[in-house]
Image (cartoon, rainbow, N blue to C red):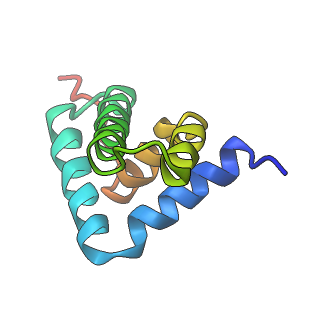
Amino acid sequence: MDLNEITITNLVIKWLEKEAYSKNHWQTVAEEIKEKNQHNTDQAIDQLASAIEGFHNLYKNKVVQENNLLQDLLTLNFDKVQWRLVAKRFIKKTGTISPPDRR
């Protein structure tokens, strides 16, 4: 049985939101990135997606150093995660990003 991208992406979202410290951390990062990109939702989502993916690849490389089942599972499945959807979930929870003022 092969898990599809949406299933794996939803599992990652649930995992990130499972523990309060993880959920709070990524929500804070999303808010900071949203603030930096005040009027560009796509750019904010791209930057957060890159940050989340980078963190998890670093985790995989630093914590799971040996060739074992965990490394194989993470490598196979992290490649299937739609990181933009994960980021979009956190960005959406920060509220809407207002369009630029046109004065």
In-front residue for pair 9/28? 9
Residue 91 versus residue 23 in the image, above or below: above
Which residue, as the protein is rendered here, is positioned at the far right? Answer: 1
Q: Quadrant of residue 23?
A: bottom left
Tell me if 97 is positioned left or right of 78 in this view: left
Residue 26 versus residue 82 in the image, above or below: below
Tell me if 79 is positioned left or right of 91 in this view: right
Tell me if 96 is positioned left or right of 35 in this view: right
Name the residue located 34 percent from the left edge and 44 percent from the top edge.
Answer: 65
Q: What x and y, as percent, mark residue 44? A: 30, 33
Which residue, as the protein is rendered here, is positioned at the far front? Answer: 67
Q: Quadrant of the C terminus?
A: top left
Name the residue located 68 percent from the left edge and 47 percent from the top edge.
Answer: 6
Q: How many marks?
A: 0
Name the residue located 51 percent from the left edge and 66 percent from the top edge.
Answer: 14
Residue 25 versus residue 9 in the image, above or below: below
Name the residue located 55 percent from the left edge and 34 percent from the top edge.
Answer: 79
Q: What x and y, as percent, mark residue 49? A: 38, 36
Q: What x and y, as percent, mark residue 19? A: 34, 75
In-front residue for pair 5/48? 5
Tell me if 85 is positioned left or right of 95 in this view: right
Residue 11 versus residue 52 in the image, above or below: below
